[in-house]
Amino acid sequence: MFLPVLPNKITKLKRTQLEFGGLDLRENPGEGALRDSAGISTRAFPHLAVCGGSRKLTEYNNPTDMFEHNGRLFVVDGEQLMCDGVPVCAVTSGIKQFAVVGRRLCIFPDKIAYDLRDGSVWYMERSMQIDLSRSPTRLNSGGLTVTPVRETVQTGKSQKFERTGLSGPFAYTCTYTYGTDKEALERCFKRGGWTDLQKNRRLKDICYNNTGEHLQTGDIVIPQKTADGEISIVGNPYKLINVDGELAVDPQYYPDEGLYNREGYYCVITSVDTDLDRGADTLVTYDVYKTDGADVLFESNFQIGDAVSIQGTPFGIKDARGVTVTDITAQTNTLVFAENAVRDAEYYCILSAQAAGSTPLTLEAGGRYVTFTPEKALDRGTLLYMGAVYTGDTGTTPTRKITVYLWDEQTKQTAGEFEASVSDTYVEGAVETIAYTLIEGSLTVRKPLPDLDFICESDNRLWGINRSENRVYASRRGEPDSFFDYSGTDGAWNMTFGSEDGFTAVCAFGGGVCCFKENKLHKILGTSPAQYYVSDYNMEGVAQGCERSLQIIGQQLYYKGVHGVYAYSGTAPKLVSAPLGELHLRSACAGTDGRIYYLSGQTDSGGVRYAFDLLHKIWVKESTEDTRAYACIDGMMYMLHSQGVFIHNLPDRSQSTYMLEFAPFCEDTLSKKTYTKLLFRVAMAAGSGLSVYLSTDGKDRIQVYTHTPDSDTTVTVPVRVQRCSSFSVRLEGRGDVKLTGMLRECAIMSEV
């Protein structure tokens, strides 16, 4: 008996060629999506390749921030700013805000401007404190004049430079000089000092080893100190070591920072005698000076057009804010102000007795007797101040006049004024007063600069935000250190915003200045202060602490918002990080090379760095490093993280490590699947490594394949999978590896 053969329609074979996707952390990602990755790049997409190699820049010891401009790399290394590995100025350690306005690189919160052309350093906020009892000072409506006082510490001091020869174990240095210009030297010290001489390029190194014959009379030398604290122009010894057959200074031995001259001492050479009996030594005689806060040189600290404040005058009568400097007279060291910018107060008097109203009152002020008639009674303790003496117009007999002002200490304003006559002879019945002049205490002249939490450049102005004031500032056009001179169409501008939410970032974009909050954008448009107007938008803004995530790429502005990464083109921002889910990333920082948007920050489990391929719109996770700053120079990415500054994406991938884990593969049917075959197509360089791990139905991973080729090759990796409902695969290894294809085959079985 023959039975009919029934076809087996229970088992169905299904083959799927996968298209690689990016990182997708959502619940139901697409086929080929990644659940996790490290060291993987999308530059070879549709293939997945290993990231390029990296190399550490060894010239930085403690980098904390980084900035690129026109191919030059600026790094904050400890307490100094480095430009392409060379120190340029002293800064505080930590995170900075950078913006370039014209030729100046502005650095906040240090408020320093570095000239990108000549390398000079300018302190944007400048302050000078004048000891009125020590420095002759005059302040009136015409300006402020201070006579500099230089402290002479010692005269006629002599020291000898003794030759020891470079072949000896030690040599001596003559430290540093600044030519013969005392004022230039003092300006240099006031702009940042010379605590670390290598940081100040204005100082000229004259380390002629252990000789002094290059010194000349009049030269100014910045000395160091000896071990016992004495000032010495014969530098401290340094040790010579052999480096590749040449003598060099041992950096571990010299210089000894503990012996730096940090107090402002400098020496002026008075004689140089090289005609000694030994013929090889040099005897140098010099005077020692000290520059400090009393040596005020306006020319070195201020410039014409600066808006300065003056504080510390008696009773605050002559204090002023926003006074414009119209001229600086170097010969007399005078700041010249606009007419009547400062109250014309020559004397300050406090009445020691009550004075009746409508009755002539005579009081003594500075050796003169001043008579006037107050309109009302003046109580004891009333404060008066007087202007300069002028000639009154009384017909044929000229008389000397002076204006007396009544001062209200509560409002700090003038409460009345009287015309008075002046006499140099004693007047019977003169009221005794307590007189003051500008000879005591201290006077502070300051060019203020607002404290800016975020800065950017737009229309040749420095824009910034002060979070505590909820205020936006714009400097004068072309003058990033002038925020309180509002004159003309190029004048400064500021505005306080009433909304309660704090600002989170600022950026020049779309023809205006975008001032972000977490849920709002204030966009400032216009070409001059008179034309500025603000447009407000309720939209997803920049998350708090993520102001460094802003990157302009093409016509899009990318930034980290509260719920993810957004792309803003001038209309409603678009969320581009949906595959990453609810992206809880703190202190986000971003960089770009024009094709990839790199984003890093802190999560609850540590640091992370993502890369977003702008062309293919896919994400990968590159590393668990908390990258703090990015720069792109000649197509190469520079990244700063806890281990230092690194150049990334180098061609050599032999030491690169990688890992990628695919999201679980599942079928949409209820049938059980038997995965009969899983194939990878992998291009591998010689010496690279590949290991494949498999997990089915959530079980522990098991290694199913490993390979290390001796030569460049392309391999097909077959992997058989047991009966399961889902599986995930993980690849990891080292070296130049490229995943070019993936095929899976399964048999759909019965539901039993």
Image: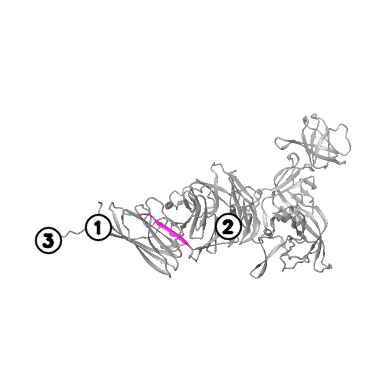
Residue kind at label 3, given as amino acid type? Phe
Q: Residue 721 carries which label?
A: none
Residue drawn where x is 44% and y is 48% of the image: 582
Q: What stretch is highlighted in magenta?
A: 656-664
Please give left or right for residue 353 compared with residue 523 in the image: right
- Mark number, residue 67: 2
Q: Which of marks 2 and 1 is in front?
A: 1
Element type where label 2 sits in the image = strand
Amino acid beneath label 2 = Phe
Q: Where is residue 241 in the image (x, y as percent from the top left)?
A: 67, 66
Is 705 on the left-hand or right-hand side of 206? left
| Numbered disc in front, either 2 or 3 | 3
> Which residue, given by chain and number where applicable, does mark 3 sit on?
2
The residue type indicated by label 1 comes to: Thr
Q: Name the residue under label 1.
A: 11
The answer to whether 433 is drawn above or below residue 520 in the figure is above
Q: Using the rendered view, name the quadrant where residue 219 is placed.
A: bottom right
On screen, residue 340 versus residue 62, left or right, reads: right
Q: Which residue lies furthest to the left in this view?
A: 1
Judging depth in this view, the residue of 472 and 116 nearest the camera is 116
By secondary structure, the bulk of the magenta-drawn segment is best described as strand
Q: Which of marks 1 and 3 is in front?
A: 3
Q: Position of residue 44 (x, y in %)?
A: 44, 64
**SS class of the residue under badge 3?**
loop
Task: Tell me what residue is drawn at x 17 percent, y 58 percent.
Answer: 6
Q: Position of residue 723 (x, y in %)?
A: 30, 56
